[in-house]
Image (cartoon, coloured by chain):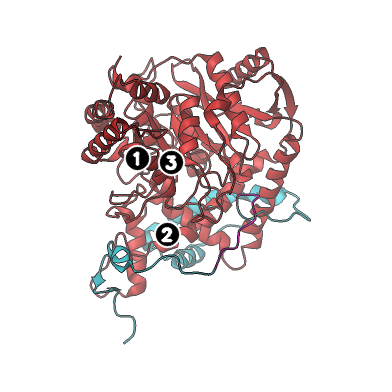
């Protein structure tokens, strides 16, 4: 067995049993990155020397009898998490030379638990996108391709496209990611892996480059649901440095995976049966519900009547918060500065931001600025906040009747790199099934459940009650076991 | 609501993003495309609904009004594009 083929759980066991060392495991992943990253572009920065140093230190700790929950496990870190002393770009030119002097709480938690960092994963610029084509470091390629059309390069989804592609291609055992409207779940589904956006407040946002603060949540992507549970346990936890961090105990998520679904009531929202959804996605959804029924769960039709308004609501709230958060990039304190001879301060701001931000980021800042501007605030931003409350109320009422909700993860399989690039609204529709969980602050898990006719992975989504990731993991594991998803991407280490 | 060119120019100025004259028409078309799509929200009855600000149900915590950090000027200045001693350099603001 090639060391990059371990699941994260399998690697932890192999390390504990002395079958492999962290240096061997890390070296195998660095070799795989060297071979495949020039094609996939999943990593912006590879920290090879530092990774080997961390692996050696981990092996030494193990000899001393000290083993953290992730001792010696090599991971990829989305380049949105500040890592002390390591370039952190957010996929943007404006942060192209930014080396943070501090560590994000989530990545710090992983280091505390013994993890090894292979490098920083590519992403859409400032996590704004659904195809990982807006990165200043170039697009990421999905390691999967269509069986009948292997030469068309597909997107890995976004914004956590580098994280998902790296894990699918076996260039990491797991990765950190973030999700503001679907940025963990959509790329996980496109790349045939699992990923969870936990409840808002579960993971600290401290040290994560901010996009839309009331929607952003960190979470893991990995090749199994249990691996996600193990990673989330380490990433999560109360942090006084984030005023929205939840002061709640972190359960043993991995233990919850094996709970089973017997007696659980699973909500099936009728508004998620969208016109134009490919029949194979509808069929996979039905299949997923049948699997759960066979394992003893009860299906309950529910209504989430404001679903159709979720995406336009998101495209007011998220750009509004982004326009405010991204005001800090002014060319004065850090990052890019662009001036012309004779530039005054205002000209410095305007040139720096025009050249430092890519087209999609500029577009969202402009929309956000407009919806917050005098005279339009009530019509747009306040209206969106009220509809957000209605969307949350829909979920509150549904969760009075059910324990979890199961839906498709995405309205399509991965698409070609040249598709959907001409119309922003068409790109936004990728998040139609995922964005509601962000608006309501709920946990959502994507789990690979099948292949489409062209051999591309399709995922299902499990949405849970706030702070009930345990039920989400149980339902996700039940789907995963029934689906027995063993298909592999064409581009992968050891292939 | 449809944005005219003057409004696009004003929004760009508020956002401190330089738009060249030749870029205004495309920006106008893109923004109007998005705003036209968002317009459907006006159909939702939101009478008496409290706006939802923030992402969590947890109330914000008060914390002691105390200094918790400091003495790290070098770290703060480490990424400055134009460091001048202990200061960030900017173009002359006051004549």
Q: CA distance from mark 2 to mark 3?
A: 17 Å
Q: Nearer the viewer, mark 2 or mark 1?
A: 1
Give residue A422's mark.
3
- Name the foreground residue: A290 vs B46: A290
Numbered badge on residue A458: none
Percent across and percent down for residue A116 are 32, 36
Asked if the magenta segment contains residue A180, the reply would be no
Residue A119 showing in the rendered view:
yes
In what quadrant of the picture does the N terminus of chain A appear? top left
Q: Assign a secondary structure to mark 2.
A: helix
Q: Which mark is residue A122?
A: 1
Q: Quadrant of the C terminus of chain A?
A: top left
Which residue occupies the foreground of this view, B86 or A22?
Answer: A22
On the image, the x and y values in percent for residue A402 come to 72, 30
Dot 2 and dot 3 within a common chain: no
Chain in red in the render: A
> Which label is found at residue B24?
2
Q: In which chain is the residue bearing label 2?
A: B
The residues colored magenta run B55-64
Q: Secondary structure at mark 3?
A: loop
Chain B shade: cyan
Instruction: Name the residue rendered at 55%, 32% in the picture.
Output: A252
């Amino acid at each position: 067995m090639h060391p990059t083929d371990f699941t994260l759980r399998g690697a932890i066991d192999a390390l504990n049993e002395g079958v492999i060392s962290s240096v061997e495991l890390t070296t195998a992943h660095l070799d795989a990155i060297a071979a495949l990253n020039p094609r996939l572009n999943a990593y912006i920065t590879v920290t090879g020397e530092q990774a080997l140093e961390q692996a050696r230190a981990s092996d030494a700790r193990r000899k001393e009898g000290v083993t953290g929950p992730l001792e010696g496990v090599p991971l990829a870190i989305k380049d949105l998490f500040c890592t002390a002393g390591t370039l952190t770009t957010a996929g943007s030119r404006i942060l192209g030379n930014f080396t943070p002097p501090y560590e994000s709480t989530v990545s710090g938690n992983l280091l505390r638990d013994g993890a090894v960092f292979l490098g920083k994963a590519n992403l859409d610029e400032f996590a704004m996108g659904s195809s990982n084509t807006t990165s200043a470091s170039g697009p990421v390629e999905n390691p999967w391709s269509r069986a009948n059309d292997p030469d068309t390069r597909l997107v890995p989804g976004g914004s956590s496209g580098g994280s998902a592609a790296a894990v699918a291609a076996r260039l990491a055992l797991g990765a950190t990611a973030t999700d503001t409207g679907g940025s963990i779940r959509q790329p996980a589904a496109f790349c045939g892996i699992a990923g969870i956006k936990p409840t808002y407040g579960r993971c600290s946002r401290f040290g994560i480059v901010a996009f839309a603060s009331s929607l952003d949540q960190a979470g893991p992507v990995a090749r199994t649901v249990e691996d996600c549970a193990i990673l989330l346990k380490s990433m999560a936890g109360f942090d006084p440095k984030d005023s929205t961090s939840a002061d709640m105990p972190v359960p043993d998520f991995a233990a919850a995976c094996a709970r089973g679904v017997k007696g659980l009531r699973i909500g099936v929202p009728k508004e998620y049966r969208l016109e134009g959804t490919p029949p194979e996605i509808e069929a996979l959804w039905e299949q997923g519900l049948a699997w759960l029924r066979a394992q003893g769960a009860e299906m309950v039709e529910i209504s989430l009547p404001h679903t159709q308004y979720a995406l336009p609501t998101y495209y007011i709230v998220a750009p509004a918060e982004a326009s405010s958060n991204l005001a800090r990039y002014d060319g004065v304190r850090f990052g890019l500065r662009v001036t012309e001879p004779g530039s005054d301060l205002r000209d410095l701001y305007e040139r720096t931001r025009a050249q430092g931000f890519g087209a999609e980021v500029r577009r969202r800042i402009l929309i956000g600025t407009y919806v917050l501007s005098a005279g339009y605030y009530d019509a747009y931003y306040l209206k969106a906040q009220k509809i957000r409350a209605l969307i949350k109320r829909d979920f509150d009422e549904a969760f009075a009747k059910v324990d979890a909700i199961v839906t498709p993860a995405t309205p399509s399989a991965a698409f070609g790199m040249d598709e959907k690039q001409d119309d922003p609204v068409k790109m936004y529709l990728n998040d139609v099934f995922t964005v509601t969980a962000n608006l309501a602050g709920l946990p959502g898990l994507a789990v690979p459940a099948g292949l489409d006719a062209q051999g591309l992975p399709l995922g299902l989504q499990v949405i849970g009650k706030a702070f009930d990731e345990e039920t989400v993991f149980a339902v996700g594991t039940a789907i995963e076991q029934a689906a027995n998803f063993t298909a592999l991407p064409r581009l992968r280490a050891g292939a | 609501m449809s944005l005219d060119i003057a409004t696009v120019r004003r929004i760009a100025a508020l956002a401190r993003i330089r738009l060249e004259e030749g870029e205004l028409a495309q920006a106008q078309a893109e923004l109007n495309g998005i705003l036209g799509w968002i317009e459907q929200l006006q159909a939702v009855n939101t009478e008496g609904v409290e706006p939802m600000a923030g992402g969590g149900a947890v109330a914000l915590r008060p914390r002691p009004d105390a200094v918790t950090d400091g003495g790290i000027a070098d770290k703060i200045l480490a990424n400055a594009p134009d460091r001048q001693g202990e200061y960030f350099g900017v173009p002359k603001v006051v004549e």
